[in-house]
Image (cartoon, rainbow, N blue to C red):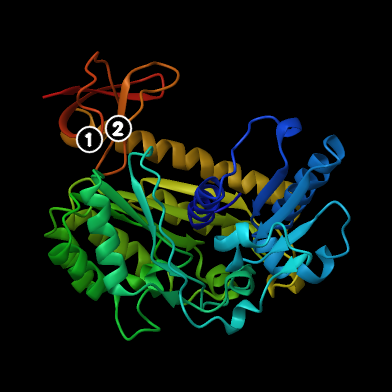
């Protein structure tokens, strides 16, 4: 469940289990273990995780259920009492999950707030077209809507040498692109006396990977020096994901976000002027405590006038244990959802406009290792993150970089022709 860091760690868990002689099965009745790597960003995700575990135990009473991830970390004291959960394994311990699943002890979760060092993890899966590398864990922010800092601990950075060596290893094994992930990658280096500039310079000068992407960044973490280096890069994919959360200063302040809307709107303008057709994604929460109709309208207008490409939107979900949960003037669920639907419609318009600007251009596309399941066409991603379908019988260009003319946008698909 949950974020890209969780998906990465889930793949690591799977690899480690297979390495230790276990086999993945598709049918619950054939399984000895049911393992859930949970998300705890909202109460809804908590309920969904516990429902899945309870359901697995009900359908197959002999199965051993293992709960790991953020719920396991935060709620370990409560989960120990649940009879439908056999093992509770923390966020740091889950990377060695196989060591614990035959233990006589039910809970394996240390206090993550005392964790000082980053635990490196390497994903060897060569079936995917893009490699993922987790470079950071934890978060030092204390946003009033969020509990993840309690689940992930302090910000901890991977060593620069580890990152460089791993990216070069990916390049040697045939990968053309690596995606850098973490809980808050903009805080990389803070605990080891380095900055994102040091990281980007090392990737640019010391690695052989043709393409790399950055995960989500706060707008304050993007400065002129960083943009200048990235704009000159032959490797960087001009794809930014900005963690914005609101486009209203009053709401940002109550969320405990340390920037103002005008600042990041200027940042967006700057990025659009420096790069050619960059993809600019963002996160927005609607209906946070105290958000009035007027506050929301300011957010809507600012987003409409912004140069964003796509807006990932979700209604605010109260999370027990956060400052936001105890704030007055909570917004009714139906209003939160209505506001989210308005922003989703706006996002769809902006994304369609962005696609149309790209039609007729020549883009470098990384051809996937597998064809599209529905159309059987070749498929791939441009540097600026557009999914492209190519009608072709060719099989010798899987996992290759091709210059592709984007020809049309039809029935929700972007089509292209290889030059």
Measuring from the top left, give residue 365's x and y in whole percent: 22, 35
- Left or right relative to 115: residue 28: right
Q: Secondary structure at mark 1?
A: strand
Measuring from the top left, give residue 220's x and y in whole percent: 37, 73
Measuring from the top left, give residue 356's x and y in whole percent: 28, 31
Quarter the C terminus occupies: top left
Measuring from the top left, give residue 389's x and y in whole percent: 31, 24
Which residue is at 81% across, 54% downward?
Answer: 85
State whether residue 268 is above or below residue 171. below
Q: Residues within 10 Å of mark 2 (few under 14, many from 20)?
A: many
Which residue is at 44% across, 21% downward?
Answer: 373
Which residue is at 29% across, 78% downward?
Answer: 195
Task: Report the label total.
Answer: 2
| Residue 100 in view | yes
| Residue 218 in view | no
Q: CA distance from mark 1 to mark 2?
A: 6 Å
Q: Give the quadrant of residue 240.
A: bottom left
Q: Which mark is residue 202?
A: none
Residue denoted by label 1: 365
Q: Secondary structure at mark 2?
A: strand
Q: Nearer the viewer, residue 303 or 389?
A: 389
- Left or right relative to 321: residue 278: left
Q: Nearer the viewer, residue 363 or 39?
A: 39
- Left or right relative to 245: residue 37: right
Query: Extreme front residue here?
Result: 21
Q: Earlier along the polypeptide chain: callout 1 or callout 2? A: 1
State whether residue 22 is above or below residue 8. above
Contact flag, marks 1 and 2 (Cβ < 8 Å): yes
Q: Residues within 10 Å of mark 1 (few under 14, many from 20)?
A: many
- Left or right relative to 99: residue 193: left
Residue denoted by label 2: 380
């Amino acid at each position: 469940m949950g974020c890209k860091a969780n998906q990465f760690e889930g793949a690591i868990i799977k690899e480690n289990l297979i390495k230790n002689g276990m086999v993945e099965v598709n049918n619950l009745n054939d399984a000895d273990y049911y393992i859930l790597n949970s998300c705890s960003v909202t109460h809804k995700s908590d309920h969904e995780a516990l429902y899945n575990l309870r359901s697995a135990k009900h359908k197959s009473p002999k199965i051993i259920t293992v709960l790991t991830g953020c719920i396991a970390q935060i709620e370990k004291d409560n989960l120990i009492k649940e009879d439908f959960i056999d093992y509770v394994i923390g966020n740091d311990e889950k990377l060695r999950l196989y060591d614990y699943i035959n233990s006589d002890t039910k809970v394996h979760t240390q206090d993550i707030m005392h964790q000082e060092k980053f635990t490196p993890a390497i994903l060897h899966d060569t079936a995917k077209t893009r490699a993922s590398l987790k470079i950071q864990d934890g978060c030092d922010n204390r946003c009033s809507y969020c509990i993840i800092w309690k689940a992930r601990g302090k910000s901890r950075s991977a060593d620069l040498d580890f990152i460089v060596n791993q990216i070069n290893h990916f390049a040697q094994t045939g990968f053309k692109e690596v995606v850098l992930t973490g809980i808050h990658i903009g805080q990389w280096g803070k605990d080891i006396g380095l900055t994102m500039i040091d990281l980007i310079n090392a990737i640019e000068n010391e690695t052989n990977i043709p393409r790399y992407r950055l995960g989500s960044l706060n707008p304050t973490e993007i400065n002129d020096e960083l943009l200048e280096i990235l704009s000159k890069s032959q490797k960087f994919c001009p794809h930014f994901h900005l963690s914005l959360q609101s486009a209203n200063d009053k709401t940002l302040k109550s969320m405990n976000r340390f920037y103002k809307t005008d600042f990041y709107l200027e940042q967006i303008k700057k990025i659009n002027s420096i790069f050619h057709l960059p993809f600019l994604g963002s996160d927005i929460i609607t209906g946070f405590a105290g958000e009035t109709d007027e506050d929301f309208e300011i957010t809507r207008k600012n987003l409409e006038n912004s140069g964003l490409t796509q807006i990932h939107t979700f209604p605010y979900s109260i999370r027990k244990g956060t400052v936001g949960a105890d704030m007055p003037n909570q917004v009714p669920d139906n209003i939160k959802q209505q506001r989210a639907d308005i922003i989703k419609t706006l996002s769809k318009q902006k994304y369609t406009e962005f696609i149309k600007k790209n039609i007729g251009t020549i883009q470098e596309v990384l051809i996937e290792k597998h064809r599209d399941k529905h159309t059987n066409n070749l498929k791939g991603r441009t540097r600026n993150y557009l999914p492209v379908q190519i009608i072709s019988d060719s099989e010798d260009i899987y996992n290759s970089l091709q210059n592709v003319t984007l020809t049309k946008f039809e029935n929700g698909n972007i089509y292209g022709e290889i030059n």
